[in-house]
Image (tube, grey):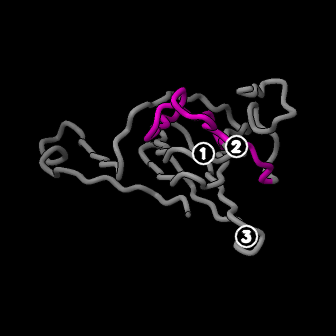
Amino acid sequence: MKIKRFFPTANLDTVRDGRGGIFTFIPHNPIVEFNFNYIKAGKIRGNHYHPEFDEYFLITEGEGVLVTHESEESGEDFIFLSKGQCTHAPKGTKHVFIAITDCTAITMLTKKWDDCENPIIHVDMGMGKGDHGVPSSSYFKSKK
């Protein structure tokens, strides 16, 4: 499993008419929940994976790096992201996002968070401690 950049299609008439453009992302599975995220420059979101749903991550403003690290043998992979770029993380894919500038993003899930028994599994990816990235964080809340 690997996070991949997710490319849109476009009706070029929406560019040719001079008003801008409309770019369309068609997910592999239906989106049932989406969240609007603010990530401050130098901060992270992630250090986890989702065992029950795929996640799409669309940057609406700013720049950052999405890092994956599947195993010691595979090493780290990253994708630089900026406004209008989207990724697809299949369920079970470890990931962490590091904001280079202040960012806003939309995350879209293929299963509702509250319908999951275990929506998130925290892991230490060696990329720093996020606000919700490690169980020892004061923000971590267990579903017990």
Query: Residue 110: where, in percent of width, then height?
Result: 43, 41
Residue at the spot x=46%, y=42% of the render?
Answer: 58
Residue at the spot x=73%, y=39% of the render?
Answer: 42
Query: Residue 121: where, in percent of width, then height?
Result: 70, 43
Quadrant in the picture for the N terminus: bottom right
Residue at mark 1 to residue at mark 3: CA–CA distance: 20 Å
Tag 1 and tag 2, C-beta contact below 8 Å: yes
Residue at the spot x=32%, y=47% of the render?
Answer: 25
Tag 1 and tag 3, C-beta contact below 8 Å: no
- Residue at mark 1: 50
Q: Quadrant of residue 67?
A: bottom right
Looking at the image, tell me whether mark 1 or mark 2 is earlier in sequence order.
1
The disc label shown at residue 75, or none: 3
Asked if residue 106 is among those painted magenta in the image, a careful observer would answer yes
Magenta region: which residues? 99-125
Residue 49 lies, with reference to residue 102, above or below; the image says below
- Residue at mark 2: 121
Query: Residue 41: where, in percent of width, then height?
Result: 69, 36
Residue at mark 3 to residue at mark 2: CA–CA distance: 20 Å
Tag 3 and tag 2, C-beta contact below 8 Å: no
Side (left or right) of 57 relative to 42: left
